[in-house]
């Protein structure tokens, strides 16, 4: 009789373990949501780079050209407070000739400005005015939205729905049913912007004909959200 009871206990334990294993079946999915927005802000990064035999001579030339750029942008209506220095550097280098003979030192002076615009459509005019005033570097144009909070929340809700839809497909294919959400994690947040690096190699070398206006159509901004979800199955 004892052996029979022990056998029943073992069988019951195996059944319970099997049920527990089934109850612990999970499906994990990721989801993404995207909401498109028109940019309402742009940052144009440009400036002057000069190579000179002396620091004083080069710096004087760079300062004069930067002052001309600031004046030209002010005439366009750009607030001086929205023109900031993002880089100011002096780099010394020498050419080496035959038998590694060091040539005379030269100095590369760089002065870079960030021009922040509340009207992205001004970006092209700002570039043209700066080039005409003496700029010979155009690093990038960055289009963004000043407030993407509501769009991000919409994208987040879409991401959750996307994760659920994927989980439903997977569970159906496996002959299971979803039995509730066990965990939900938010992924990294969108930066609400798009960067145009190397906007124009011609502008960067000062070879652009400023008689032809520069046109920059800021791409729409994709506000993106991502989630990771784990679902219980039965």
Image (cartoon, rainbow, N blue to C red):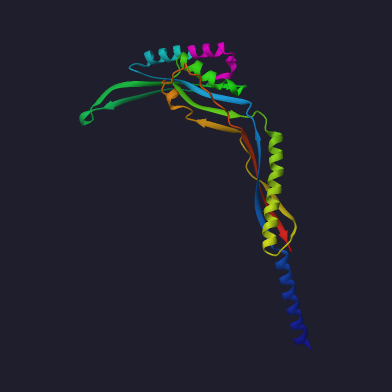
User: How many discs mark residues in the rendered view?
Assistant: 0
- Whole-percent x, y for residue 138 in the image: 47, 24
Location of residue 75 by image quarter: top right
Chief SS of the magenta region: helix
Q: Is residue 23 magenta?
A: no
Question: Which stretch is magenta?
Answer: 68-84
- Whole-percent x, y for residue 39 in the image: 62, 28
Quadrant containing the N terminus is bottom right
Location of residue 80 by image quarter: top right
Q: Residue at x 54, y 25 (%)?
A: 216
- Whole-percent x, y for residue 35 in the image: 67, 38
**153 vs 5, nearest the viewer:** 153
17 on left or right of 133: right
**60 vs 164, nearest the viewer:** 164
Q: Residue at x 69, y 36 (%)?
A: 151
- Whole-percent x, y for residue 215 in the image: 53, 23
Q: Residue at x 75, y 87 (%)?
A: 3
On screen, residue 220 above or below 182: above
Give the residue furthest to the bottom.
1
Give the residue furthest to the front.
212
Q: Is residue 77 magenta?
A: yes
Q: Residue at x 43, y 24 (%)?
A: 202
On screen, residue 55 above or below 187: above
144 on left or right of 234: left
Quadrant containing the C terminus is bottom right
């Amino acid at each position: 009789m004892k052996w029979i009871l022990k056998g029943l206990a073992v069988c019951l334990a195996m059944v319970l373990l099997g049920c527990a294993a089934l109850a612990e079946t999970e499906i994990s999915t990721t989801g993404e949501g995207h909401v498109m927005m028109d940019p309402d802000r742009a940052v144009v990064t440009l400036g002057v780079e000069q190579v000179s035999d002396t620091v004083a001579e080069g710096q004087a030339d760079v300062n004069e050209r930067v002052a001309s750029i600031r004046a030209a942008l002010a005439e366009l209506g750009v607030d001086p407070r929205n023109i900031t220095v993002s880089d100011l550097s002096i780099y010394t280098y020498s050419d080496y000739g035959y038998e590694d003979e060091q040539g005379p030192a030269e100095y590369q002076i760089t002065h870079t400005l960030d021009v922040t615009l509340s009207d992205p459509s001004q970006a092209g005019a700002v570039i043209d005015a700066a080039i005409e005033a003496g700029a010979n570097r155009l690093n990038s144009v960055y289009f963004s939205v000043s407030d993407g909070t509501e769009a991000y929340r919409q994208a987040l809700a879409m991401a959750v729905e996307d994760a659920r839809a994927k989980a439903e497909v997977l569970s159906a294919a496996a002959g299971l049913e979803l039995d509730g959400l066990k965990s939900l994690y938010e992924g990294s947040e969108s930066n609400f912007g798009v960067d145009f690096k190397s906007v124009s190699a011609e502008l960067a070398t000062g070879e652009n004909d400023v008689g032809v206006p520069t046109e920059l159509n800021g791409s729409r901004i994709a506000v993106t959200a991502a989630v990771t979800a784990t679902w219980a199955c039965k």
